[in-house]
Amino acid sequence: MTTYEIATIVGSLRTASINGQLARALTKLAPPEFHFTMVSIGDLPLYNQDDDGNQAAPVKRLKQQIQAAQGLLFVTPEYNRAIPGVLKNAIDHASRPYGESAWAGKPAGVLGASVGTIGTAVAQQQLRTILAYLDVPTLGQPEVFVQAKEGLFDADGNIAASSRAFLQGWMDRYVAWVKKQCGG
Ligand code: FNR
């Protein structure tokens, strides 16, 4: 059985992050051949181009995790109508040095949850623009803009019944698309 390693990046460092919960719950909807690794971004230094020739250990680890993956999963909040700075910092790190980006060609899913009614739509659009520049294809449909409300998750941290069919449909589509992108 061909297996697919998916580097999963959450755009919030908060312990109780809704997006972190969403990412963990989503991975439970995937088939067994898909393995999701939560990639840490909170230990990365602030990006400084002076360090391109001597990247810090967490940056090298980030790049290795991305390079080893067949696909990517971004689950992010929206901060002030943009992606959080920690996420942009991670993206910038792994895109450098020039010509040695870890991102190119890795198919990515983009989702997000927020308390606001337009549920990360602006941040996701911005993220898709950044990823397009980095030659990362993104799954276009279905879009997933989750408004975090009481009852989104059940007591075990699973997606509750109200959103489960929709998010299962998203995962099924993502899985089929990643396999296709990987030539499987
Ligand atoms: C927010 N929040 C927010 N929500 C939104 O829908 N659009 C926005 O532009 C913003 N802006 C924003 C800025 C900052 C600095 C913070 C801390 C928060 C609210 C956000 O949706 C809420 O805090 C989420 O719970 C954050 O996601 P996590 O950390 O729970 O994953």
Image (cartoon, grey):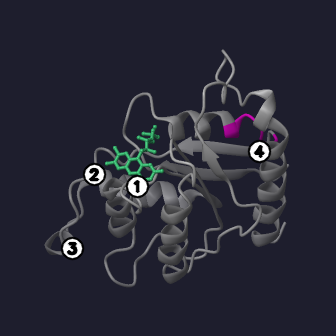
Ligand 1: does it lie within 8 Å of the C-beta at label 3? no
Residue beneath label 4, please?
Answer: 167
Categorize mark 4 by other alpha carbons within 10 Å: few (<14), some (14-19), many (20+): some
Residue drawn at point x = 46 percent, y = 34 percent:
17
Q: Kindly identify which residue carries mark 1.
A: 62
**Cβ–Cβ below 8 Å for labels 2 and 1?**
yes
**Amino acid marked by disc 2:** Leu
Stretch of the chain drawn in magenta: 26-31
* Kind of residue sitting beneath label 3: Gly
Extreme-top residue of the structure: 155
For marks 2 and 3, the one nearer the N-term is 2
- Mark 3–mark 1 Cα distance, whole angstroms, equals 16 Å
Question: Dot 2, crowdedness within 10 Å: few (<14), some or many (≥20)?
Answer: some
Measured Cα–Cα span from mark 2 to mark 1: 9 Å
Q: For the residue with label 4, is its CB less than 8 Å from the closest atom of ligand 1?
A: no
Q: Closer to the N terminus: mark 3 or mark 1?
A: 3
First in residue order: circle 2 vs circle 1: 2
